[in-house]
Amino acid sequence: MHLKSLVLAAGLAALSLPALAAPYCSPPEGLTPAPVLTPHPDEVVSGVTNAFYLLALNWTPQWCAEGGVGASAREMECSQPFGFTLHGLWPNGASKPYPRYCRPVGGLDLAMVRHMYCRTPSPVLLQHEWQAHGACGFADPRAYFGRAARLFDQLKLPKIESIAPDRLTAGAVRAAFISRNPAFRPRDIFVQTTRDQALAEVRLCYDLAYRPAACPGGNGAPDGARIRLAPSRTGAF
């Protein structure tokens, strides 16, 4: 292959890598898809008209610090350095109850799990997101994870660990995202905290054309709320 072709191929490969996660992520040997989940009947909510999309980002150090809640969290690969990772893309109705497990779907293949792993480093969570959310608005895993990956990869993730602890508020987190992603406004960014005010997730709201939009029902912790931040393994996020 000529040098020009090699350079082009390398460039295309780089464009396909997950935002910020790629330099720190190595899919483990023996990675396998998770089994299909069996939801409780009370979890199934179908027939809801989709009104907006929500892209949920985990602050992974907090997830790992809590030791996980449920099988999805226990499968999170906490031995590697991660900051924000992709929880999932959620088609939502205008108000609760939001759609979940809208129709029965099957398992993910290994190629899809490997493709998404550096964005969502948990086979169980990937399977859960496809069944609980993807099935409520997408024809197949390729369409669902393709859209989720594009939205995630387009983001410029801020380094919120550079914010001084005495200045870390929900508003500072929103401002950090907006400074790198100016299409968003504060009302488009839902900041979720734990009961003891630690950052758990940042959720970005989109309209049906995947444009940033106000989050129905509010945007979580108020701007002035002081929050704590579980440190990452490297402090580089």
Image (cartoon, rainbow, N blue to C red):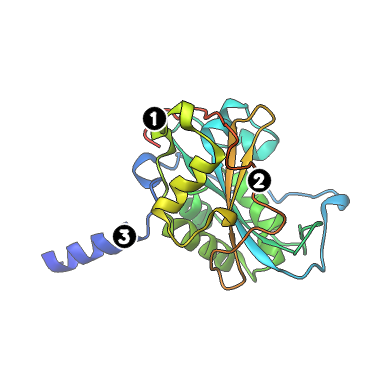
Question: Does 42 sit above or below residue 206?
Answer: above
Counting other residues with Cα less than 10 Å from the Cα at mark 3, is it few (<14), some (14-19), or many (20 or more)? few
Q: Residue at x 24, y 59 (%)?
A: 10
Q: Sort mark 2 into few (<14), some (14-19) or many (20+) by Cα contacts within 10 Å.
A: some
- How far apart marks 1 and 3 lie (CA) works out to 27 Å
Left-right relation of 107 to 146:
right
| Residue carrying label 3 | 13
Quarter the C terminus occupies: top left
Q: Which residue is mark 1?
A: 235
Q: In the structure shown, which secondary structural element does the residue marked by tag 2 occupy?
A: loop
Q: Quadrant of residue 48?
A: bottom right
Q: Between 218 and 120, which is closer to the camera in this rendering?
A: 218
Residue under pointer 2? 220
Give the foreground label among 1 and 2: 2
Q: Which of the two marks, 1 or 3, is nearer to us in this view?
A: 1
Tag 3: amino acid: Ala
